[in-house]
Amino acid sequence: MQWYEFWDDFLEEVSYVEGRRVYTHERLRKARSSLIILSNQGTLFNYLDPVLTCEGALPRTNNRIEGGINASLCSLLRNHRGM
């Protein structure tokens, strides 16, 4: 919220493109909206939740399927000369 308050004026800047009023920093505004939504849903920084780490450290990645089921498919595609 401190970041939001500090940069609020900057993110409210507008420009005029072909007579239309558009936000100058539209991509930053979209990123800010995404972070606010994730924060409100409680899904941002879940890995810091002490309940999740009570049984030990979390794995570095949650994508175990890539090393198991899809490994042969990835190897096949990597070694295919025509691709």
Image (tube, rainbow, N blue to C red):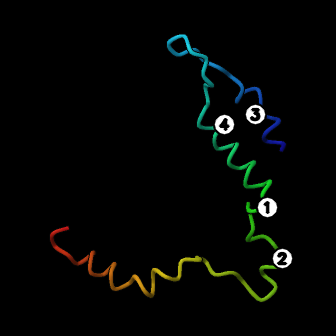
In contact (CB < 8 Å): disc 3 and disc 2: no
Question: What number is the disc on residue 33?
Answer: none
State the image coordinates of residue 2 (x, y, percent, origin top left).
Answer: 84, 42
Question: What number is the disc on residue 7?
Answer: 3
Q: Which is more foreground, mark 3 or mark 4?
A: 4
Q: Earlier in the sequence, mark 3 or mark 4?
A: 3
Q: Which residue position is annotated with label 1?
A: 42
The secondary structure type at the circle numbered 4 is: helix
Q: Which is more foreground, mark 2 or mark 4?
A: 4
State the image coordinates of residue 65 (x, y, percent, origin top left).
Answer: 49, 82
Nearer to me, 19 or 2: 19
Q: Residues within 10 Å of mark 1 (few under 14, many from 20)?
A: few
Q: Is residue 51 above or below residue 19?
A: below
Q: Is residue 82 above or below residue 13?
A: below
Q: Residues within 10 Å of mark 3 (few under 14, many from 20)?
A: few
Q: CA distance from mark 3 to mark 4?
A: 10 Å
Nearer to me, 32 or 60: 32
Residue type at mark 4? Arg
Q: Quadrant of residue 45?
A: bottom right
Q: Earlier in the sequence, mark 1 or mark 4?
A: 4
Residue type at mark 1? Gly
Q: Which residue position is annotated with label 4?
A: 29
State the image coordinates of residue 1 (x, y, percent, origin top left).
Answer: 83, 44
Q: CA distance from mark 3 to mark 2?
A: 31 Å
Residue type at mark 3? Trp
The secondary structure type at the circle numbered 1 is: loop
Q: Residues within 10 Å of mark 2 (few under 14, many from 20)?
A: few
Q: CA distance from mark 3 to mark 1?
A: 23 Å
Q: Quadrant of residue 42?
A: bottom right
